[in-house]
Image (cartoon, rainbow, N blue to C red):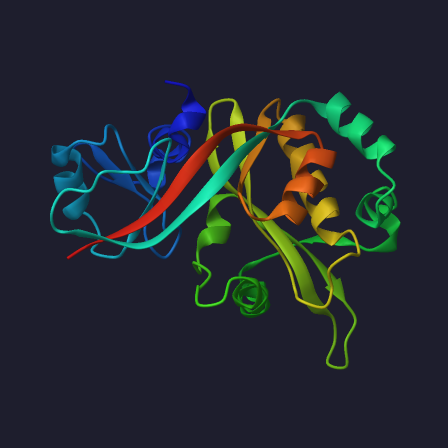
Amino acid sequence: MHPLDNPSWKALTTHQSQFALATGMARRFPPEMCIHGALALPMPPAFQDMAKLSPEPVGLLTRQKPMLPPGWTVTRAVELLEMVQEGPEAASSAASSSPTEDLAQAAHPGDFQIDDLTAADLPQMSAVYESTRPGRKLSPKLYQLGGFVGIREPGSEGSQLVAMACLRLHFPGYREISTVATMPGHEGRGYATALVAELARRIRARNEQPFLTVRTDNQRAIGIYERLGFRERVKLFSTTIRKD
């Protein structure tokens, strides 16, 4: 099996194993850090092991829709594209051939500053997250998996965070870019492009390959990622489940 077919399992059993809640065939991140977990194999004993971990809902990333044994309920299900950046030359070529405003802005990073965010920024990070993902909450310790970067704009009460992205899953050879978000009313200024490009640059500086997931119906984001050299690898199913 390719490591990107079950990325959460790979992360929780390698570079991020120190964070794992684990028993038998199940692993998950602490809920306050990340909702994701994984099974070694989609078998009833593995679900039994998962039930022994935190009672909070857990999110699974799988190649096929999971067949749940009795006693589990799906609370959220979306289809995602898993995209991998082919290489810096692909990103450079894509960027130079596209005249969009996003890429024009990304080509001139002096127009805005990218900051590394800290725990002190959590209130503003949560506001950006909740404005782009209604009904969902930002895991307050997600930043511990790799850190967030963000862009601020001046406001009446000081600078305001308007866009952000983070590093999340990490395993040999690969690093995930996640939680890309731009506050409504601030789109079209190249912020998402610049943030993803910066995180991809950092990943490649460590000789690792950037990857990310995006909803299959988010055509605007897919277009941005394609122009940065990301290409679809497979479709994944993101299923959040809860033990009854």
136 to the left or right of 71: right
Residue 199: give x, y in percent of width and height: 65, 40
Question: Viewer-proximal residue, 222 or 153?
Answer: 222
Q: Position of residue 90 (x, y in %)?
A: 74, 24
Q: Nearer the viewer, residue 118 or 96?
A: 96
Does residue 228 appear to the left or right of 45 in the view shown? right
Residue 232 lies, in percent from the top left, at 57, 29
Q: Residue furthest top?
A: 1
**Quadrant of the image for the N terminus?**
top left
Task: Please tell me in which quadrant of the rendered image residue 57 appears.
Answer: bottom left
On screen, 213 above or below 137? above
Instruction: State the residue at coordinates (86%, 32%).
Output: 96
197 to 242, vertically: above or below: above
Q: Is residue 227 left or right of residue 13?
A: right
The residue that appears at 69% across and 22% down in the rendered structure is: 87
Q: What's the residue at 42%, 23% (across, down)?
A: 3
